[in-house]
Amino acid sequence: MAGGVDLHSHTTASDGALGPRELVRLAARHRVRVLAVTDHDSTEGLPEAIDEASRHGIEIVPGLELNTDVPGAEIHVLGYYVDWQAEWFQAFLREQRAERVARVHRIVERLTELGMPLTADEVFAICKEGSPGRPHVAQAMVKRGYVKSVREAFDKWLRADGPANVPRRRLTPVEAVAVIRRAGGVPVLAHPGLANRDEMVPELVEAGLAGIETYYPEHSVAQITAYRQMCARLDLVATGGSDYHGVHTGRASTLGSPHIPLEVWEDLKRKAGELRNQGQGTAKRAPQPPDGAPEPTQHAHGPGESDPPPSMPGHPRH
Ligand SMILES: [Zn+2]
Ligand SMILES: [Zn+2]
């Protein structure tokens, strides 16, 4: 059957360049039949994407991507088929986004100290309704003429261990996996080839990880083979997607590429059904909220947690 699957894409609800409807129309042109919309810390692009997709015969997989920090790297965790309309889950996402906004304020303060005055409002004007982040800061720096390109802004200033980067308050990968399981979703380790922290996989599986993003534009053939084998060995679903952000975002991926067959989506759906049947109790080591507190954010930003150290090398781009 013609057409493929793309299980990783971004809209203006986070740091993508296209609105949800435009993204879906582009997917139709690229003959994508199943598209997961996976914005950072947000499901706000989903209603429009689902509505638009119904006109193009495209199936939308509801998803999102959580950015988490470990010493020396950023680990991203994708969540598919989460119960995204649950109020507690939306409250959790709002808190994650509020931390993003606070971080933009800290980064522009740092840039101003470094002799590149910038206001948070200039950054928010670029990102409009989405989740503000370093890509928007980088675009504001280009606009001001401090750098020639988004790429240069990251390379010189905003990379994980760059002079103007201020790390986010820590959400750990284990916590992200547990939150997605608690929301009834399938947690998948995003683009593991970029972060190079494969030694974390057993711990994440223990916490309830159910898949690894295997097919990814920047994964080599050898990495794809290795992650496929890892998935087979650990009974994880091997997913994949383009991580499309749109043009002019400093990222080069093409929607619908690499080509991923429909079977990958069928495996993901099967896994989602399995997890729902098992219930949430099977996450073997999911951290519980303290004192019966209902919100998972309690342990994400619990007392005693401090910001990670300022030196955070790792892949810089999203
Ligand atoms: Zn990512
Ligand atoms: Zn992404």
Image (cartoon, grey):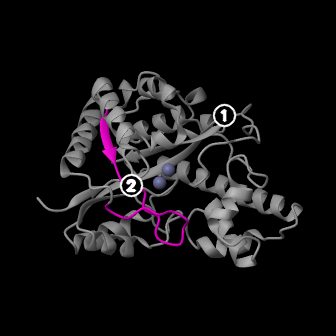
Based on the displayed image, in which of its 4 quarters is residue 205 positioned? top left
Viewer-proximal residue among 23 and 182: 23
Above or below 288: residue 68: below
Based on the displayed image, in which of its 4 quarters is residue 138 positioned? bottom right
**Residue 187 seen in the current view:** yes
**Residue 185 seen in the current view:** no
Secondary structure found at label 1 = loop
Q: Is residue 145 left or right of residue 67?
A: right
Secondary structure found at label 2 = loop
Query: Can you identify the residue that label 2 sits on?
Result: 8
Q: Is residue 204 left or right of residue 146?
A: left
* Label 2 packing within 10 angstroms: few (<14), some (14-19), many (20+): many
Above or below 84: residue 229: above
Viewer-proximal residue among 71 and 278: 71
Q: Which mark is on residue 71?
A: 1
Q: Which residues are magenta?
A: 236-256
| Viewport quadrant of the N terminus | bottom left
Give the amino acid type for the residue marked by disc 2 in the picture: His
Above or below 2: residue 236: above
- Can residue 282 be found in the magenta stretch? no
* Label 1 packing within 10 angstroms: few (<14), some (14-19), many (20+): few
